[in-house]
Amino acid sequence: MATRQRIETLSRFTSCDIGDALVKLKYPYGGFLDGIKMYSPGSKGPVVGPAITVRMVETSDISAPKLDQHFVDYNQSGHIMYIHQPPGLSAACWGGLMSTRAQHLGAAGAVVNGRIRDQREHKELKFPVFGRDSSILGSNTFTKASQVDVPLQFKGELWIHPGDIILGDEEGVVVTPVSLIDQVIAFCEERAEIDKLTVECLMKGEAMGPVLRKLRK
């Protein structure tokens, strides 16, 4: 489990910074949750926290496991709920009521690999919501939650595990496994200093090519 201090340190950086670090570390796709974008800004700066994963299934799947309570009630303070919806569905699986409950439980935000709705409600609540697309339809007869805190495959070799650190901002969403947090922080801190020097050189009128060759060896 990542400590709060390490999570707070990670929050000093952007999704782009962390993605670059994970690419350098050869983590699949740089941890980038491709296609997921911000629908409700919620707060200044990045939204970051450990993942609580939720696997959704189509309502017609009667063989899927069932939860003991509504999936939104599994939210925890400071965590980000990652909801994985079956692809190709036209209905949303996250709406204003979910954000209301999640916010009451202290959740840091929600990331939906699927559709969301009630965008105005999320914005009024200032609750951070990220999603792949939107819909006017509720889940109701289309999809249901089946499992919580299970590993979920996002794309290829990129999986999201319970407790992985999710960070979302206006650029996108990135996921960092706990085992790589210290290396990611170290890379981001080093790169931040290099970027500062790079900007100083560019502001003096130096050409990009030579500056990059000098500072980014």
Image (tube, rainbow, N blue to C red):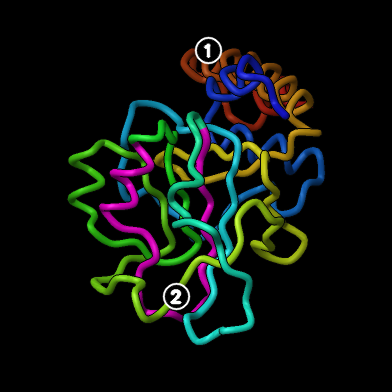
Q: Quadrant of residue 189?
A: top right
Labels in figure, total:
2
Q: From the viewer's side, name the closer residue of 71 and 133.
A: 71
Of 13 and 20, the residue lying toward us: 13
Look at 46% across and 16% down and name the residue there. 203
> Residue 143: which numbered mark, if any?
2
Left of 153 or right of it: where is 54? Answer: left
Quarter holding residue 193: top right
Q: Going 43% across and 80% down the picture, which residue do you hit?
A: 89
Residue 51 x %, y %: 59, 42
**Which circle's residue, 1 or 2, is located before the other in the chain?**
2
Point 32% across, 46% down: residue? 99
Q: Secondary structure at mark 2?
A: strand
- Quadrant in which the N terminus appears: top right
Mark 1 and mark 2 residues within 8 Å of each other at the beta carbon: no
Q: Residues within 10 Å of mark 2 (few under 14, many from 20)?
A: many
Q: Which residue lies at the image location 34% right of the left edge and 37% below the top edge?
A: 103
Q: Amino acid at mark 2?
A: Thr
51 left or right of 36?
right
Q: Please say whether residue 136 is one of the residues in the magenta stretch.
A: no
Q: Looking at the picture, which amino acid does disc 1 mark?
A: Glu
Q: Residue 27: x percent and y percent?
A: 78, 47
Reply yes or no: does residue 90 show up in magenta.
yes
Identify which residue, 82 or 211, lies in the foreground.
82
Q: CA distance from mark 1 to mark 2?
A: 52 Å
On the rendered structure, is 175 left or right of 36? Answer: right
Span colored in magenta: 79-103
Vertical comparison of 169 with 28: above or below? above
Residue 61, given in percent of the width and then of the height, sits at: 56, 84
Disc 1 target residue: 200
